[in-house]
Amino acid sequence: MRWKNRALAEAFATWCEHAEEQGRLERVAGKVVQRLQNGALLSAWAAWRSCVEEQQRLSRVGLKVVARWQGGVLSRALARWAENAWEHRRLARVAGKVVQRLQNGLLSAAWNAWRASSAEQRRLTRSASKVMMRWKNRALAEAFATWCEHAEEQGRLERVAGKVV
């Protein structure tokens, strides 16, 4: 009987650790979900979350069954629960990696958008500079033409004055 109680106590302790880890993962996942903007990502996240909830439900059902069983059935049930707990931890690690990749993808997209915007801004600045230079050159050309007309007129007036005198 002591062996059965010890096995149950160990199973319960493992379950408590699992519950604490699950709570921590849910808090972290909640923060990540708040950052996600893309509908496709959210649907993938919802599917993963549904799988996790189903895994939790199965673990709870398994614990209830373990409480009713005795002898060899108990050890097989505990072995199955341990497999489920291991699989859940593996899925949580995989989901963490997926979330990390999604975050990196969003960061990369933001960086690329900034670079494109910066390049476009530089292009527009160069274009505006060229337009300003054309306007300045046009104004300078017009001023030079006016000066030339004025110089011609001045020369003509001097020639006319020279003939009058």
Image (spheres, grey):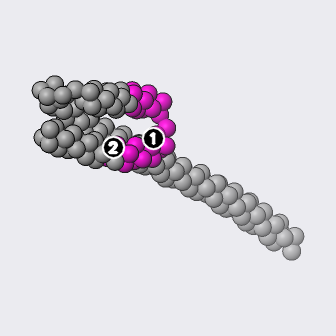
Q: Earlier in the sequence, mark 2 or mark 1?
A: 2
Q: Which is more foreground, mark 2 or mark 1?
A: 2
Residue type at mark 1 is Val
Quarter of the image that includes the N terminus: top left
Quarter of the image that includes the C terminus: bottom right
Most frequent secondary structure within the magenta stretch: helix
Q: Is residue 17 above or below residue 158?
A: above
The residue that disc 2 covers is 19
Q: How crowded is mark 1: few (under 14 residues within 10 Å), some or many (20 or more)?
A: some
Q: Which of 48 and 86 is in front in this view?
A: 86
Q: Is residue 33 inside the magenta stretch?
A: yes
What residue sits 42% from the left and 29% below the top?
46
Q: Which of 117 and 69 is in front in this view?
A: 69
Residue 94 at least partly seen: no
Q: Which of 70 and 37 is in front in this view?
A: 70
Res. 33 mark: 1
Q: How crowded is mark 2: few (under 14 residues within 10 Å), some or many (20 or more)?
A: few
Q: What element carries label 2?
A: helix
State the image coordinates of residue 135 (x, y, percent, origin top left): 64, 54
What residue sits 24% from the left and 30% below the top?
66
Residue 37 at least partly seen: yes
Q: In this view, does 104 lie to the left or right of 163?
A: left
- Quadrant of the rendered image containing residue 104: top left
Q: Is residue 56 inside the magenta stretch?
A: no
State the image coordinates of residue 77 (x, y, percent, origin top left): 19, 28
Please state the extent of the stretch shown in magenta in the rendering: 21-50
Q: Is mark 1 on a helix, strand or loop?
A: helix
Residue type at mark 2 is Ala
What residue sits 39% from the left and 27% below the top?
50
